[in-house]
Image: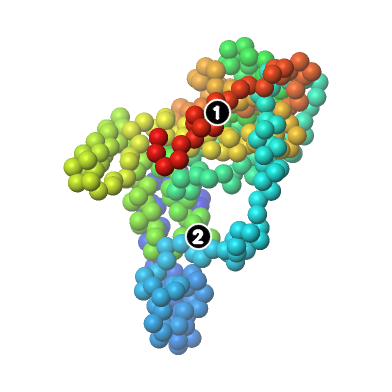
Amino acid sequence: MKRNDIKRGLWDSLILYWRWNRESLLRNVSAFAENGRHVIGMDGPVETGSEKGVGRGNSSMPPFFSSMPPSLSSSSSSSSLPLDAMKRVVHERRSCKRFDPTKPIDLDVVSDLLAMTVRAPTALNLQPWVAVVIHEEEQRETLSRAALGQPQPRDAPVTVVFAGDMEPESNAPAALEMGLESGYYHSLYGAAYLRHVYYLLHGGPCEAMSHVKAIVSAWYSESTGNAMLSVPRNKQAYAWKQVMIPATTFLYLATAAGFDTAILEGFDEAQVRRVAGLPPRFTVPVIISVGHGAKNGFHSVRSPRFPTKHLVRWGKF
């Protein structure tokens, strides 16, 4: 399956998936005929005469996900996270109020940081977000006006506009194909994946189906006591939730790289979309300016936080 069109329609995706699945099955049958007692599956050769069946362990059902790489399945004690370094990044990050416009930054480094940001967690691997890098002087001036005259987008050498896709289900065909081709998804998972994505996220005209599904799910859960999947009623809220994960990831990566940052949410969203050339289906929760702070670019006192016990509860609220 070739990802020639990321925004492929559901019907075309289903046809291509079943065609791919049939070809995969034929390859396995041919391998069985040639090898007699072995079939090449996603988890390597499987003995057809054993009680293990297809896949790993003693389960008779094939796994939906391929096995974890050996390097990731080892004990956490052998590869602990550099927690002290992470603590420093978290505690040293401050919101920069004024950037030094005379100090540029290396765009290649920004590109590397964004490449790492792509590994941020994402629901169903749909990755329904984009990051538009604003660095030309004229464009920065326009973005500053869209941000109600705040100086950070104008003075910082780079501002990244993080935008969420309010039609995240349109990424499902390409996400499924990547999963199948890489071996992350089992071939039998395709139909279930598409069904799950479109049930969760396809809202229909004027989002009517989203509201109907949400009401029915809530009623069934309350009536029977059985847990039901909560369906998003507001596509903008869902998009903002998804995009804030990579945005926060980038914020801390930039801090770790030695840059000062400012995450801004006070702006005219329609004007920001125009500056970034975003289609109407994208919504912008935040923009992040990156550079080097001026001498007077920070408050002399760090912003206070509530006590941990005020925000963190154990067991129940």
Residue type beneath disc 2: Tyr
Frontmost of labels 2 and 1 is 1
Q: Outermost residue, left direction?
A: 223
Residue type beneath disc 1: Pro
Q: Outermost residue, right direction?
A: 102
Q: What residue lies at 36% left-to-right and 31% top-to-bottom?
A: 234
Residue 73 at x, y percent in the picture: 57, 63
How many other residues sit within 10 Å of disc 1, few (<14), some (14-19) or many (≥20)?
A: few
Location of residue 213 by image quarter: top left
Residue 228 at x, y percent in the picture: 28, 46
Q: What residue lies at 55% left-to-right and 25% top-to-bottom?
A: 306
In this orientation, does residue 34 appear? no
Q: What residue lies at 58% left-to-right and 34% top-to-bottom?
A: 247
In this orientation, does residue 173 appear? yes
Element at label 1: loop
Q: Check residue 299 in the rendering and tell me which mark sits there, or answer none.
A: none
Q: Which residue is mark 1?
A: 307
Location of residue 259 by image quarter: top right
How many other residues sit within 10 Å of disc 2, few (<14), some (14-19) or many (≥20)?
A: some
Q: Tell me which label, 2 or 1, sits earlier in the chain.
A: 2
Q: Which residue is mark 2?
A: 184
Element at label 2: loop
6 on left or right of 15: right
Closest to the observer, 7 or 282:
282
Q: How many marks?
A: 2
